[in-house]
Amino acid sequence: MVVTKYSLIGAVLQAYPSAEKCFNEMGMHCVSCHMSPRETLEQACRVHSCDVDELIRKLDEHINGPV
């Protein structure tokens, strides 16, 4: 799975449950949010005032290992 700002949080967490840690590190507790299945990374970052590029970088490193 390629993670982009258009990826749904629910899809990312379904494919990579351990990625919850990346969201938590950003102060985003998406696992317990009822919106996460239908919300994109970009939408969630906007709501939480987080940098979507930083979140994607964290997720990529978590999924694929450090660059």
Image: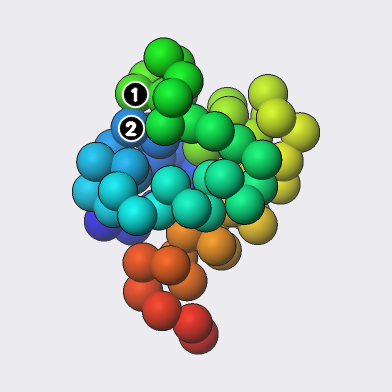
Q: Is residue 9 above or below residue 19?
A: above
Q: Earlier in the sequence, mark 2 or mark 1?
A: 2
- The residue at 71%/47% (across/down) is 51
Tag 1 residue? 37
Give the image location of residue 30, x and y in percent.
49, 31
Which amino acid type corresponds to the residue marked 2 in the rendered image? Gly
Q: For residue 37, what is the image quadrant?
A: top left
Give the image location of residue 8, x and y in percent.
38, 33
Q: Is residue 55 left or right of residue 16?
A: right
Tag 2 residue? 10
**Given the current orientation, which residue lies at the most extreme right position?**
49
Determine whether label 2 and label 1 are within 8 Å by CB. yes
Element at label 2? helix
Which amino acid type corresponds to the residue marked 1 in the rendered image? Pro
Give the image location of residue 41, x and y in percent.
51, 37
Q: Is residue 9 left or right of residue 14?
A: right
> Badge 1: how crowded within 10 Å, few (<14), some, or many (20+)?
some
- The residue at 52%/54% (across/down) is 22
Which label belongs to residue 3? none
**Given the current orientation, which residue lies at the most extreme top position?**
34
Q: Is residue 27 above or below residue 66?
A: above
Nearest the viewer among 2 and 25 is 25
- The residue at 41%/14% (across/down) is 34
